[in-house]
Image (cartoon, rainbow, N blue to C red):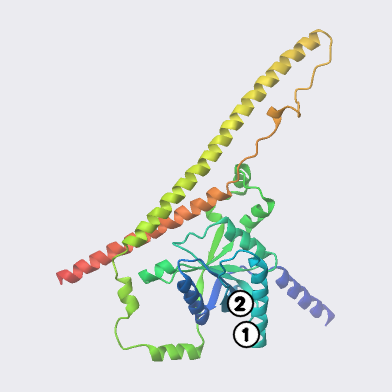
């Protein structure tokens, strides 16, 4: 009996120590509606809110959420925000609602969410919540009939690099790390209780198509494409500026190496003359010499984030253009019939 109890305790401790990887984010339909309502009411202003739920095995359940207030004054926002969160969670606990924080949600404009601020927020959450997610909602895609919800988390390899603060080229090549390895997208599953599902079935009309079906057939997406192109051009300019920083660094590095070689050649010639005169040679390295001071390499984090945004905008343009071609061919076939 003692052996069985010891084995059981060992199994429990092992399960607690090694948590299964996060496979899916299961979010209640009511929480989805709250997120959409909050983001659309304040669009194009970016808003955030808290996600509440449970972490059950490989599933992160989001059962509720509440918005953070939008303030115009920047003074004491952080302290007021923390007090607001604590008060809200206390009120939810009193009415027997899940009050465990599992992450946060935020709105975005055309998917431009890959920023240093998002990473810093993730790292702050990671200090207390090991498995947290950020749900991104893009209100601008709602006009195209798309529910643009995305659940993101930071990859383990990126968090290790970020804590070390080393984003040099050598370190990234050593870890085989690329710009696609920063974020991990977790599949989202929207769930409803049996009562809610039955109520939604009662609300369904007998019409063969709904307004959402008509919205998806709308072919006027010129503003969406134009905004994507503007954001893409801005990102390309930012990426070009980042490339110029690296070019400047490598020019300075080459110049420093040439100066070091000239100095060493001169020191070796001087040492040969000193040996001939029977004197002690001078050291071939002089740490006090500024040409031997290492030049810090610029961080590649910003360029990786910009590359992520470029890839996102290109994907959106490609997706919308492909859908438009499909709608045009469909409309053409309808007209011919």
> Is 125 positioned to the left or the right of 230 in the image?
right
Residue 278, compared with residue 42, is above or below; it is above
Percent position of residue 331, x then y: 22, 68
| Residue drawn at x 73%, y 18% as measured from the top left | 267
Percent position of residue 151, x then y: 53, 68
> Is 295 positioned to the left or the right of 334 in the image?
right
Q: Which residue is farthest left?
A: 336
Residue 97's label in the rendered image is 1
Residue nearer the viewer, 19 or 52: 52
Pointer 2: residues within 10 angstroms few (<14), some, or many (20+)? many
Q: CA distance from mark 2 to mark 1?
A: 9 Å
**Figure quadrant of the C terminus:** bottom left
Percent position of residue 276, x then y: 79, 8
> Is 254 positioned to the left or the right of 224 in the image?
right
Residue 52's label in the rendered image is 2
> Does the image show residue 151?
yes
Percent position of residue 123, x then y: 65, 61
Pointer 1: residues within 10 angstroms few (<14), some, or many (20+)? some
| Residue drawn at x 42%, y 56% as measured from the top left | 313
The earlier-in-sequence mark between 2 and 1 is 2
Pointers 2 and 1 in contact (CB under 8 A)?
Answer: yes
| Residue drawn at x 50%, y 51% as measured from the top left | 306
Residue nearer the viewer, 177 or 33: 33
Residue nearer the viewer, 198 or 124: 124
- Quadrant position of residue 129: bottom right
**Figure quadrant of the N terminus:** bottom right
Q: Which residue is farthest top?
A: 277
> Dot 2: what SS?
strand
| Residue drawn at x 29%, y 83% as measured from the top left | 208
Residue nearer the viewer, 254 or 198: 254
């Amino acid at each position: 009996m003692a052996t069985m109890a010891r084995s059981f305790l060992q199994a429990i401790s092992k399960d607690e120590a090694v948590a299964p990887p996060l496979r899916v984010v299961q979010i209640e339909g009511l929480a989805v509606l709250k997120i959409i309502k909050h983001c659309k009411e304040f669009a194009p202003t970016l808003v955030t809110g808290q996600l509440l739920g449970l972490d059950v095995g490989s599933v992160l359940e989001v059962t509720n959420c509440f918005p953070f207030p939008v303030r115009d004054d920047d003074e004491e926002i952080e302290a007021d925000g923390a007090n607001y969160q604590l008060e809200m969670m206390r009120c939810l606990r009193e009415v027997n609602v899940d009050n465990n924080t599992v992450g946060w949600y935020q709105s975005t404009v055309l998917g431009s969410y890959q920023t240093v601020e998002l990473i810093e927020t993730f790292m702050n959450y990671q200090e207390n919540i090991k498995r947290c997610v950020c749900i991104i909602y893009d209100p601008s895609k709602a006009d195209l009939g798309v529910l643009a919800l995305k659940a993101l988390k930071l990859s383990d390899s990126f968090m290790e690099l970020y804590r070390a603060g080393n984003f040099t080229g050598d370190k990234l090549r050593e870890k085989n790390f690329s710009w696609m390895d920063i974020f991990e997208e977790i599949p989202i599953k929207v769930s409803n209780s049996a009562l809610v599902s039955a109520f939604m079935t009662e609300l369904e009309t007998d019409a063969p198509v709904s307004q959402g079906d008509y919205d998806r057939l709308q072919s006027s997406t010129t503003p969406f494409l134009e905004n994507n192109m503007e954001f893409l051009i801005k990102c390309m300019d930012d990426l070009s500026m980042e490339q110029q920083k690296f070019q400047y660094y490598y020019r300075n590095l080459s110049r420093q190496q040439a100066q070091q070689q000239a100095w060493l050649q001169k020191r070796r010639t001087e040492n040969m003359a000193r040996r001939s005169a029977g004197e002690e040679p001078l050291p071939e390295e002089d740490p006090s010499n500024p040409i031997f001071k290492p030049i810090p390499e610029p961080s590649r984090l910003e360029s990786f984030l910009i590359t992520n945004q470029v890839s996102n905008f290109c994907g959106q343009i490609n997706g919308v253009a492909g859908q438009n071609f499909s709608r045009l061919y469909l409309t053409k076939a309808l007209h011919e019939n």
